[in-house]
Amino acid sequence: MAQASAIEWTEATWNPVTGCTKISPGCKFCYAERMAHRLQAMGQERYRDGFRLTLQPDVLEIPLRWRKPRTIFVNSMSDLFHKDVPLGFIKQCFEIMRRAAQHTFQVLTKRPDRAAEMATELDWHDNIWLGASVENSDYTWRVHALRGVPARTRFLSVEPLLGPIPRLPLEGIHWVIVGGESGPGARPMREAWVTQIRDHCLRLHVPFFFKQWGGVRKSQTGRLLGGRTWDEMPKIPGGAGVQAQSGPMA
């Protein structure tokens, strides 16, 4: 429920909630759903109900045991702001993140509107980042909702990128991740869609991270864009976790 991660833009995952429900096109081939059913088939007790939303309170304090600073993706197997996660439990997660101040917590949601609605109920310490997923131009409203949250660092995960987003709003956004869909049934991503977002980030000096081209076999397509990798990160106070980059990384 908390472990080292192979995800390129983080170092570890922490899952006090598992399971979710689909709400937009980016959810169609959800990797977390595939993983949950695989773990269920293997007899993993935490996934006995497959991908049904489940609170996992016994893992709440795990980040407190990690002394070495690291970046932590919160709920890689769920969404902390799902409508069925009680405010009281979300507050418990935020209290753990506050106490584990040596870490940087990357909370990613497809429900930034709910996060904005309860923002005044939560304690937004500087080590708690909030991101929103935006898969095509129909969901740029999530960026506007994200701006209603007083997180010091707000980011976008444009993954899977399913179409062009010519007017991706970046005011008040501190980081952008872009990636193609991977795994069975993966929908294609065009290079022009990616470079349009990258160039927009460069113009506005927003750190840009290109995660992958994706595809059925993502290891074969790699993550080079224009002959190089793009691993820019927002600055992390104290230099904790993933190395912050002030400019493009070759």
Image (spheres, rainbow, N blue to C red):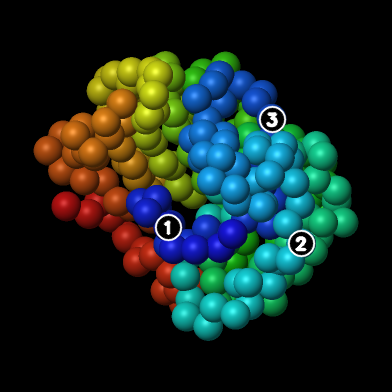
Q: Which residue is drawn at 56% across and 63% down?
A: 2
Task: Check disc 2: other Cα within 10 Å, few if <14, some if 14-19, many if 20+.
Answer: few
Tell me where residue 207 appears, x and y as whole percent: 38, 48
The tag earlier along the polypeptide, 1 or 2, is 1
Tell me where residue 189 appears, x and y as whole percent: 33, 21
SS at mark 2 in the image: helix
Whether tag 1 and tag 3 are in contact, CB under 8 A, the answer is no
Amino acid identity at mark 2: Pro
SS at mark 3 in the image: loop
Residues 174 and 85: in front is 85
Q: Residue at x 25, y 51 (%)?
A: 248
Visible in this render: residue 119? yes
Q: Which residue is drawn at 30% across and 26% down?
A: 215
Residues 5 and 33: in front is 33
Which picture quadrant has residue 74?
Answer: bottom right
The answer to whether residue 219 is above or below residue 162 is: below
According to the image, label 3 marks what residue?
A: 21
Residues 132 and 85: in front is 85
Whether tag 1 and tag 2 are in contact, CB under 8 A, the answer is no
Quadrant containing the N terminus in the rendered view: bottom right
Residues 196 and 204: in front is 196
Query: Which residue appears farthest toward the left when viewing the image?
Result: 227
Q: Which residue is drawn at 45% across and 32% down?
A: 159
| Residue 57: image tag | 2
According to the image, label 1 marks what residue?
A: 5
